[in-house]
């Protein structure tokens, strides 16, 4: 089966730029979304993105605290990797819905 | 309608975009109370601001100082007396029995743990890690005989009311008083 990598103008996003379908996501697409947020993705970014996608698929309600306890990054690093609202920005790049978390 | 009820409101509501100049950039949260629920309100709002990419400064004064002392930060209580919203059917005389307030506070903290809410010291560490700044009020610290070493390591300084207002400088700042 051939895998088609979609670009940002081929996928559906909501008014805030979050992917409507998590399965449209690909690392290439992530780079494209990240560029719009002025972030150049590194290995560390992808580790976080993959963790977020896994947890989201498991139905975990994501929070800054959980990411801090993930063992991948601490909270300070998380803020540094995704400036300007880390949980929202990283979720957008990870292609998962906007998190509805207060903590 | 069914669809709306099944999902949390936050995922349904479209957040209005504020494109004009009135954009919120910074919050200064003053916490003057030492009750568990008041302190948490301040911490949740400060942390929430950082999560939104805003700047957040916190200023603890009077009984709010309890929340940033090494000794008491993780042992705050909720008021069971003089708090009509707390178990309205509970007679005040019962709510005032020795140990009742400690028990109620313990139960409340347990409920918070279930929601994955961190304890006060961890919450303060999270806020600091997110770039938030935490200050203590000089006048209140003197009144309660508190020194820098009595306060949590994350406390950036003991400052005057004038210094506090300086923290709020700049366009797009809101001051929240608790």
Image: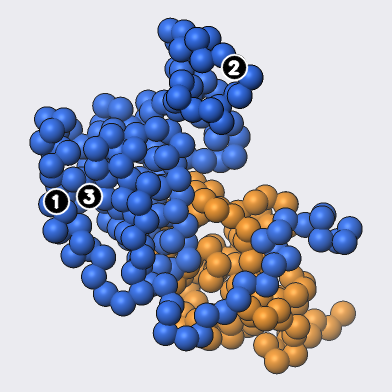
What is the spatial separation of the Cα atoms under label 2 and label 3, in whole angstroms? 37 Å
Q: Residues within 10 Å of mark 3 (few under 14, many from 20)?
A: many
The reply to whether callout 3 and callout 1 are in contact (CB within 8 Å) is yes
Name the chain under label 1. B
Whether residue A71 is visible here, answered yes or no, is no
Point out the tag, 2 or 1, that comes first from the N-terminus.
2
Q: Is residue A26 left or right of residue B107?
A: right
Place of residue B172 in the rendered image (x, y in percent of width and height, measured from the top left): 36, 74
What is the spatial separation of the Cα atoms under label 3 and label 1, in whole angstroms? 7 Å
Point out the tag, 2 or 3, that comes first from the N-terminus.
2
Q: Quadrant of residue A80?
A: bottom left
What hue does chain A carry in this figure?
Answer: orange
The residue closer to the viewer here, B30 or A33, is B30
Element at label 1: strand
Place of residue B43 in the rendered image (x, y in percent of width and height, measured from the top left): 41, 47
The residue closer to the viewer here, B45 or A18, is B45
For the point 39% across and 40% down, which residue is it? Answer: B39
Residue bearing the label numbered 3: B135
Q: Which mark is residue A6?
A: none
Q: Is residue B25 left or right of residue B66?
A: right
What hue does chain B carry in this figure?
Answer: blue
Point out the tag, 3 or 1, that comes first from the N-terminus.
3
Q: Which mark is residue B159?
A: 1
Place of residue A58 in the rendered image (x, y in percent of width and height, measured from the top left): 72, 52
Which mark's residue is nearer the viewer, 2 or 3? 2
The residue closer to the viewer here, B53 or B173, is B173
Residue bearing the label numbered 2: B90
For the point 59% across and 55% down, which residue is it? Answer: A101
For the point 60% across and 24% down, which residue is it? Answer: B87
For the point 30% across and 42% down, which residue is it? Answer: B32
Whether residue B39 is visible here, answered yes or no, is yes
């Amino acid at each position: 089966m051939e895998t088609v990598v979609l670009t940002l103008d081929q996928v559906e996003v909501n008014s805030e730029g979050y992917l409507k379908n998590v399965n449209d996501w690909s690392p290439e697409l992530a780079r494209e979304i990240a560029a719009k947020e002025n972030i150049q993705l590194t290995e560390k970014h992808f580790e976080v993105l993959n963790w977020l996608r896994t947890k989201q698929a498991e139905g975990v309600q994501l929070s800054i605290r959980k990411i801090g306890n993930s063992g991948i990054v601490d909270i300070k690093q998380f803020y540094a990797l995704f400036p300007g609202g880390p949980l929202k920005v990283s979720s957008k790049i990870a292609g998962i819905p906007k998190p509805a978390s207060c903590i | 309608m069914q669809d709306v009820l099944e999902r949390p409101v936050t995922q349904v509501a479209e957040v209005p975009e504020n494109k004009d100049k009135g954009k919120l950039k910074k919050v200064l949260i003053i916490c003057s109370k030492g009750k568990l629920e008041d302190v948490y309100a301040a911490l949740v709002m400060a942390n929430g601001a950082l999560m939104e990419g805003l700047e957040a400064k916190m200023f603890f004064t009077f009984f709010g100082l309890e929340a940033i002392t090494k000794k008491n930060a993780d042992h705050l209580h909720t008021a069971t007396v003089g708090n009509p919203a707390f178990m309205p059917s509970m007679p005040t005389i019962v709510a005032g029995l020795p140990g009742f307030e400690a028990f109620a506070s313990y139960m409340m903290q347990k409920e918070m743990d279930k929601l994955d809410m961190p304890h006060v010291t961890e919450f303060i560490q999270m806020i600091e890690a997110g770039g938030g700044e935490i200050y203590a009020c000089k006048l209140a610290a003197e009144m309660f005989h508190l020194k820098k070493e009595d306060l949590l390591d994350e406390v950036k300084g003991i400052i005057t009311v004038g210094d506090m207002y300086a923290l709020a400088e700049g366009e797009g700042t809101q001051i929240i008083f608790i």
